[in-house]
Amino acid sequence: MQRAALSGVCGPLRGGARPGPVVSWRLVCLFHTGLRVFAADKELLVKLRKKTGYSFVNCKKALEKFSGDSKQAEAWLHEQAQKEGWSKASKLQGRKTKEGLIGLLQEGNAAVMVEVNCETDFVARNVKFQQLVQQAASGTMFHHQGAKDQLTTYIKRFMKAAELSQLRTGPAGCLLSDQLALAIGKLGENMAIKRAAWVAVPATYYIGSYVHGALPVDNPSLTNVALGKYGALVICQASEQSQKSNLADLGRRLGQHVVGMAPLSVGSLEDEPGGDTETKMLAQPFLLDPSITLGQYVQPQGVSVLDFVRFECGEDTEIPEVEQTQQRLAQEENSS
Protein backbone atom coordinates (compact mmCIF):
# COMPACT_ATOMS: atom_id res chain seq x y z
CA MET A 1 0.00 0.00 0.00
CA GLN A 2 2.81 2.42 0.98
CA ARG A 3 4.76 1.47 -2.12
CA ALA A 4 1.73 2.16 -4.33
CA ALA A 5 1.18 5.52 -2.68
CA LEU A 6 4.77 6.55 -3.26
CA SER A 7 4.55 5.34 -6.82
CA GLY A 8 1.45 7.43 -7.30
CA VAL A 9 2.84 10.64 -5.91
CA CYS A 10 6.14 10.34 -7.76
CA GLY A 11 4.50 9.77 -11.11
CA PRO A 12 1.12 9.19 -12.82
CA LEU A 13 -0.85 6.20 -11.52
CA ARG A 14 -1.84 3.44 -13.86
CA GLY A 15 -5.18 3.91 -15.42
CA GLY A 16 -4.91 7.73 -15.19
CA ALA A 17 -6.01 7.83 -11.56
CA ARG A 18 -5.20 10.99 -9.64
CA PRO A 19 -2.80 10.76 -6.73
CA GLY A 20 -4.32 10.89 -3.31
CA PRO A 21 -3.95 13.66 -0.79
CA VAL A 22 -0.33 12.73 -0.17
CA VAL A 23 2.32 15.39 -0.54
CA SER A 24 4.64 14.66 -3.43
CA TRP A 25 7.93 13.18 -2.30
CA ARG A 26 9.74 14.95 -5.08
CA LEU A 27 8.27 18.30 -4.04
CA VAL A 28 9.27 17.60 -0.45
CA CYS A 29 12.82 16.88 -1.59
CA LEU A 30 12.91 20.01 -3.71
CA PHE A 31 11.34 22.06 -0.94
CA HIS A 32 13.89 20.96 1.63
CA THR A 33 16.77 21.34 -0.82
CA GLY A 34 15.54 24.81 -1.64
CA LEU A 35 15.48 25.69 2.02
CA ARG A 36 19.09 24.60 2.40
CA VAL A 37 20.19 26.65 -0.62
CA PHE A 38 18.30 29.71 0.58
CA ALA A 39 19.80 29.43 4.05
CA ALA A 40 23.28 29.18 2.57
CA ASP A 41 22.63 32.22 0.36
CA LYS A 42 21.39 34.19 3.35
CA GLU A 43 24.49 33.27 5.35
CA LEU A 44 26.76 34.32 2.50
CA LEU A 45 24.78 37.53 2.12
CA VAL A 46 25.18 38.43 5.79
CA LYS A 47 28.93 37.66 5.72
CA LEU A 48 29.49 39.66 2.54
CA ARG A 49 27.49 42.59 3.88
CA LYS A 50 29.45 42.60 7.14
CA LYS A 51 32.82 42.28 5.42
CA THR A 52 32.33 44.91 2.72
CA GLY A 53 29.84 47.35 4.23
CA TYR A 54 27.85 47.54 1.00
CA SER A 55 24.04 47.41 0.99
CA PHE A 56 22.12 44.12 1.16
CA VAL A 57 20.66 44.83 -2.28
CA ASN A 58 24.09 45.18 -3.91
CA CYS A 59 25.53 42.19 -2.02
CA LYS A 60 22.57 40.04 -3.12
CA LYS A 61 23.00 41.19 -6.70
CA ALA A 62 26.71 40.33 -6.60
CA LEU A 63 26.13 36.84 -5.17
CA GLU A 64 23.46 36.11 -7.76
CA LYS A 65 25.73 37.35 -10.55
CA PHE A 66 28.53 34.97 -9.54
CA SER A 67 26.40 32.03 -8.35
CA GLY A 68 27.33 32.41 -4.70
CA ASP A 69 31.09 32.86 -5.22
CA SER A 70 31.82 35.35 -2.43
CA LYS A 71 35.35 36.21 -3.62
CA GLN A 72 34.21 37.16 -7.09
CA ALA A 73 31.20 38.95 -5.62
CA GLU A 74 33.42 41.00 -3.31
CA ALA A 75 35.82 41.93 -6.13
CA TRP A 76 32.89 42.99 -8.32
CA LEU A 77 31.41 45.11 -5.50
CA HIS A 78 34.72 46.94 -5.00
CA GLU A 79 35.02 47.50 -8.75
CA GLN A 80 31.51 48.94 -8.98
CA ALA A 81 32.01 51.09 -5.90
CA GLN A 82 35.27 52.39 -7.32
CA LYS A 83 33.60 53.31 -10.60
CA GLU A 84 30.80 55.02 -8.71
CA GLY A 85 33.34 56.76 -6.50
CA TRP A 86 35.34 58.11 -9.44
CA SER A 87 32.09 59.30 -11.03
CA LYS A 88 31.07 61.06 -7.82
CA ALA A 89 34.57 62.45 -7.36
CA SER A 90 34.48 64.11 -10.77
CA LYS A 91 31.08 65.63 -9.98
CA LEU A 92 32.13 66.84 -6.52
CA GLN A 93 35.49 68.18 -7.64
CA GLY A 94 35.88 71.84 -6.76
CA ARG A 95 33.80 71.74 -3.61
CA LYS A 96 35.74 73.04 -0.60
CA THR A 97 37.29 70.51 1.76
CA LYS A 98 38.25 72.43 4.90
CA GLU A 99 37.25 69.79 7.44
CA GLY A 100 38.94 66.44 8.02
CA LEU A 101 41.56 64.90 10.26
CA ILE A 102 45.25 64.79 11.00
CA GLY A 103 46.53 61.22 11.38
CA LEU A 104 49.75 60.38 13.23
CA LEU A 105 51.48 57.00 13.04
CA GLN A 106 54.71 56.21 14.88
CA GLU A 107 56.74 53.01 14.43
CA GLY A 108 60.10 52.72 16.14
CA ASN A 109 62.48 55.39 14.87
CA ALA A 110 60.05 56.71 12.23
CA ALA A 111 56.82 58.70 12.31
CA VAL A 112 54.26 59.84 9.75
CA MET A 113 51.75 62.65 9.87
CA VAL A 114 49.05 63.04 7.20
CA GLU A 115 46.18 65.42 6.51
CA VAL A 116 43.03 64.11 4.84
CA ASN A 117 40.20 66.54 4.12
CA CYS A 118 36.45 66.35 3.60
CA GLU A 119 33.57 68.83 3.47
CA THR A 120 31.95 68.38 6.90
CA ASP A 121 32.96 67.42 10.42
CA PHE A 122 30.11 64.88 10.36
CA VAL A 123 31.93 62.83 7.71
CA ALA A 124 35.27 63.30 9.51
CA ARG A 125 33.78 61.36 12.43
CA ASN A 126 32.67 58.49 10.20
CA VAL A 127 34.72 55.31 10.64
CA LYS A 128 35.10 54.87 6.86
CA PHE A 129 36.72 58.29 6.59
CA GLN A 130 38.96 57.48 9.56
CA GLN A 131 39.99 54.26 7.81
CA LEU A 132 41.04 56.36 4.82
CA VAL A 133 43.25 58.48 7.09
CA GLN A 134 44.82 55.31 8.47
CA GLN A 135 45.42 53.98 4.96
CA ALA A 136 47.13 57.24 3.99
CA ALA A 137 49.40 57.07 7.05
CA SER A 138 50.18 53.37 6.53
CA GLY A 139 50.86 53.91 2.82
CA THR A 140 53.30 56.74 3.56
CA MET A 141 55.10 54.65 6.19
CA PHE A 142 55.31 51.65 3.85
CA HIS A 143 56.65 53.80 1.01
CA HIS A 144 59.61 54.88 3.17
CA GLN A 145 60.22 51.47 4.72
CA GLY A 146 63.78 51.04 3.44
CA ALA A 147 64.88 54.62 4.07
CA LYS A 148 64.98 54.55 7.89
CA ASP A 149 67.88 52.13 8.35
CA GLN A 150 71.50 53.03 9.14
CA LEU A 151 70.87 56.74 9.58
CA THR A 152 73.56 59.08 10.91
CA THR A 153 71.20 62.06 11.18
CA TYR A 154 67.48 62.66 10.91
CA ILE A 155 65.51 62.87 7.67
CA LYS A 156 62.31 64.83 7.09
CA ARG A 157 60.34 64.41 3.88
CA PHE A 158 57.11 65.95 2.64
CA MET A 159 54.65 64.56 0.08
CA LYS A 160 51.85 66.27 -1.83
CA ALA A 161 48.50 64.98 -3.02
CA ALA A 162 49.72 63.84 -6.46
CA GLU A 163 52.48 61.68 -4.95
CA LEU A 164 50.29 60.30 -2.19
CA SER A 165 47.61 59.16 -4.62
CA GLN A 166 50.09 56.74 -6.23
CA LEU A 167 51.15 55.08 -2.96
CA ARG A 168 49.93 51.65 -1.94
CA THR A 169 48.66 50.79 1.51
CA GLY A 170 50.99 47.76 1.82
CA PRO A 171 52.83 45.04 -0.12
CA ALA A 172 49.65 43.87 -1.84
CA GLY A 173 47.52 46.90 -1.02
CA CYS A 174 45.41 49.13 -3.24
CA LEU A 175 46.40 52.55 -4.54
CA LEU A 176 45.42 55.38 -2.22
CA SER A 177 43.65 57.01 -5.16
CA ASP A 178 41.35 53.95 -5.39
CA GLN A 179 40.72 54.01 -1.63
CA LEU A 180 39.88 57.71 -1.91
CA ALA A 181 37.38 56.98 -4.69
CA LEU A 182 35.76 54.22 -2.60
CA ALA A 183 35.37 56.57 0.37
CA ILE A 184 33.85 59.30 -1.81
CA GLY A 185 31.43 56.78 -3.32
CA LYS A 186 30.30 55.56 0.11
CA LEU A 187 30.13 58.90 1.95
CA GLY A 188 29.10 61.23 -0.87
CA GLU A 189 31.45 64.14 -0.09
CA ASN A 190 34.43 65.61 -1.84
CA MET A 191 37.67 64.49 -0.16
CA ALA A 192 41.40 64.96 -0.61
CA ILE A 193 44.55 63.33 0.75
CA LYS A 194 46.30 66.68 1.00
CA ARG A 195 49.79 66.14 2.40
CA ALA A 196 52.09 63.97 4.47
CA ALA A 197 55.31 64.31 6.41
CA TRP A 198 57.66 61.41 7.15
CA VAL A 199 60.42 61.65 9.74
CA ALA A 200 63.11 59.11 10.68
CA VAL A 201 65.91 59.41 13.23
CA PRO A 202 69.04 57.43 14.24
CA ALA A 203 69.36 55.63 17.56
CA THR A 204 70.65 58.62 19.56
CA TYR A 205 67.64 60.75 18.57
CA TYR A 206 63.94 60.44 19.30
CA ILE A 207 60.66 61.81 17.98
CA GLY A 208 58.18 63.54 20.25
CA SER A 209 54.58 63.54 19.03
CA TYR A 210 51.21 64.98 19.95
CA VAL A 211 47.70 65.15 18.43
CA HIS A 212 45.24 67.74 19.70
CA GLY A 213 41.47 67.41 19.51
CA ALA A 214 41.88 63.64 19.39
CA LEU A 215 38.74 61.70 18.50
CA PRO A 216 37.61 58.59 20.37
CA VAL A 217 38.16 55.59 18.09
CA ASP A 218 35.78 52.65 18.45
CA ASN A 219 37.24 50.56 15.64
CA PRO A 220 40.08 48.30 16.95
CA SER A 221 41.84 48.41 13.58
CA LEU A 222 42.46 52.15 13.99
CA THR A 223 44.11 52.11 17.42
CA ASN A 224 47.67 52.49 16.05
CA VAL A 225 46.86 55.84 14.40
CA ALA A 226 46.14 58.93 16.50
CA LEU A 227 43.47 61.17 14.96
CA GLY A 228 42.75 64.84 15.64
CA LYS A 229 42.58 68.37 14.27
CA TYR A 230 46.19 69.39 15.03
CA GLY A 231 49.38 67.37 15.10
CA ALA A 232 53.08 67.84 15.77
CA LEU A 233 56.32 65.87 15.45
CA VAL A 234 59.37 67.16 17.33
CA ILE A 235 62.86 65.83 16.53
CA CYS A 236 65.15 65.79 19.55
CA GLN A 237 68.59 64.56 20.52
CA ALA A 238 69.15 63.33 24.06
CA SER A 239 72.46 63.60 25.89
CA GLU A 240 73.89 60.83 28.03
CA GLN A 241 72.73 62.71 31.15
CA SER A 242 69.07 62.85 30.08
CA GLN A 243 66.62 60.45 31.70
CA LYS A 244 65.55 58.05 28.97
CA SER A 245 62.41 57.03 30.87
CA ASN A 246 61.03 60.58 30.67
CA LEU A 247 61.61 61.12 26.96
CA ALA A 248 58.09 60.05 25.94
CA ASP A 249 56.45 62.54 28.33
CA LEU A 250 58.92 65.25 27.38
CA GLY A 251 58.26 64.63 23.68
CA ARG A 252 54.52 64.93 24.28
CA ARG A 253 54.94 68.27 26.09
CA LEU A 254 57.13 69.60 23.27
CA GLY A 255 54.47 68.51 20.78
CA GLN A 256 51.81 70.32 22.81
CA HIS A 257 53.95 73.46 22.71
CA VAL A 258 54.37 73.28 18.94
CA VAL A 259 50.61 72.83 18.43
CA GLY A 260 49.66 75.61 20.84
CA MET A 261 52.35 78.22 20.09
CA ALA A 262 52.79 77.55 16.35
CA PRO A 263 56.51 78.42 16.04
CA LEU A 264 58.01 79.02 12.61
CA SER A 265 61.59 77.97 13.40
CA VAL A 266 63.59 76.31 16.20
CA GLY A 267 65.97 79.18 16.98
CA SER A 268 68.78 78.71 19.48
CA LEU A 269 69.35 78.77 23.23
CA GLU A 270 71.15 82.11 22.84
CA ASP A 271 68.03 83.88 21.54
CA GLU A 272 66.54 86.54 23.79
CA PRO A 273 63.27 85.50 25.46
CA GLY A 274 60.28 86.67 23.47
CA GLY A 275 56.63 87.28 24.16
CA ASP A 276 53.45 85.76 22.77
CA THR A 277 54.32 86.97 19.25
CA GLU A 278 57.73 85.26 19.23
CA THR A 279 58.08 82.76 16.36
CA LYS A 280 61.36 81.06 17.38
CA MET A 281 60.46 77.94 19.32
CA LEU A 282 63.23 78.00 21.96
CA ALA A 283 62.63 81.70 22.72
CA GLN A 284 58.87 81.34 23.12
CA PRO A 285 57.21 81.24 26.55
CA PHE A 286 56.76 77.56 27.38
CA LEU A 287 53.10 76.70 26.82
CA LEU A 288 52.78 74.73 30.07
CA ASP A 289 54.78 77.24 32.16
CA PRO A 290 54.90 80.73 30.61
CA SER A 291 57.28 81.97 33.34
CA ILE A 292 60.17 80.32 31.45
CA THR A 293 61.06 79.88 27.80
CA LEU A 294 60.97 76.54 26.07
CA GLY A 295 64.77 76.65 25.85
CA GLN A 296 64.98 77.12 29.61
CA TYR A 297 62.68 74.13 30.04
CA VAL A 298 64.62 71.66 27.86
CA GLN A 299 68.21 72.67 28.63
CA PRO A 300 68.38 71.24 32.20
CA GLN A 301 66.91 67.98 30.91
CA GLY A 302 69.82 67.33 28.58
CA VAL A 303 67.70 67.51 25.43
CA SER A 304 68.34 69.43 22.21
CA VAL A 305 65.41 70.33 19.96
CA LEU A 306 66.53 70.01 16.33
CA ASP A 307 63.41 70.37 14.21
CA PHE A 308 59.64 70.00 14.16
CA VAL A 309 56.61 69.55 11.88
CA ARG A 310 53.21 71.07 12.65
CA PHE A 311 49.96 70.29 10.83
CA GLU A 312 46.67 72.10 11.32
CA CYS A 313 43.65 70.63 9.55
CA GLY A 314 42.30 72.93 6.84
CA GLU A 315 45.12 75.48 6.96
CA ASP A 316 46.39 77.13 3.78
CA THR A 317 50.09 76.43 3.67
CA GLU A 318 52.81 75.81 1.12
CA ILE A 319 54.17 72.29 1.28
CA PRO A 320 58.01 72.12 1.14
CA GLU A 321 59.37 70.62 -2.06
CA VAL A 322 62.57 68.99 -0.81
CA GLU A 323 63.83 66.40 1.61
CA GLN A 324 65.28 68.09 4.67
CA THR A 325 68.13 66.85 6.86
CA GLN A 326 70.04 68.32 9.78
CA GLN A 327 72.98 69.29 7.55
CA ARG A 328 70.76 71.00 4.95
CA LEU A 329 68.94 73.04 7.60
CA ALA A 330 72.26 74.10 9.17
CA GLN A 331 73.48 75.30 5.77
CA GLU A 332 70.28 77.29 5.21
CA GLU A 333 70.53 78.95 8.63
CA ASN A 334 74.21 79.88 8.05
CA SER A 335 73.45 81.41 4.67
CA SER A 336 70.55 83.52 5.97
Image (spheres, rainbow, N blue to C red):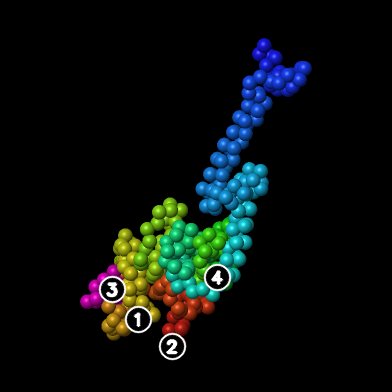
Q: Tell me what residue is drawn at x 51 percent, y 66 percent.
A: 189
Which image quarter is the N terminus in?
top right
**Residue 141 or residue 71, whichever sits in front:** 71
Indicate which label's residue lies in the foreground, 3 or 4. 4
Q: Tell me what residue is drawn at x 37 percent, y 58 percent.
A: 216
User: Is residue 201 visible in the rendered structure shown here?
Assistant: no
Q: Looking at the picture, does residue 33 appear above or below residue 122?
A: above
Cα gap from disc 3 to disc 4, whole angstroms? 41 Å
Q: Looking at the picture, does residue 15 appear above or below residue 319?
A: above
| Residue tagged 1 | 280
Q: Which residues are magenta?
A: 286-301
Cα gap from disc 2 to disc 4, whole angstroms? 44 Å
- In the image, farthest residue toward the bottom: 336
Cα gap from disc 1 to disc 2, whole angstroms? 15 Å
| Residue tagged 2 | 336
| Residue tagged 4 | 92
Percent position of residue 104, x then y: 43, 64
Cα gap from disc 4 to disc 1, whole angstroms? 40 Å
Percent position of residue 97, x then y: 48, 72
- Check disc 2 and give the amino acid type: Ser
- Check disc 3 and give the amino acid type: Leu
Percent position of residue 192, x then y: 52, 69
Closer to the N terminus: mark 4 or mark 1?
4
Q: Secondary structure at mark 3?
A: loop
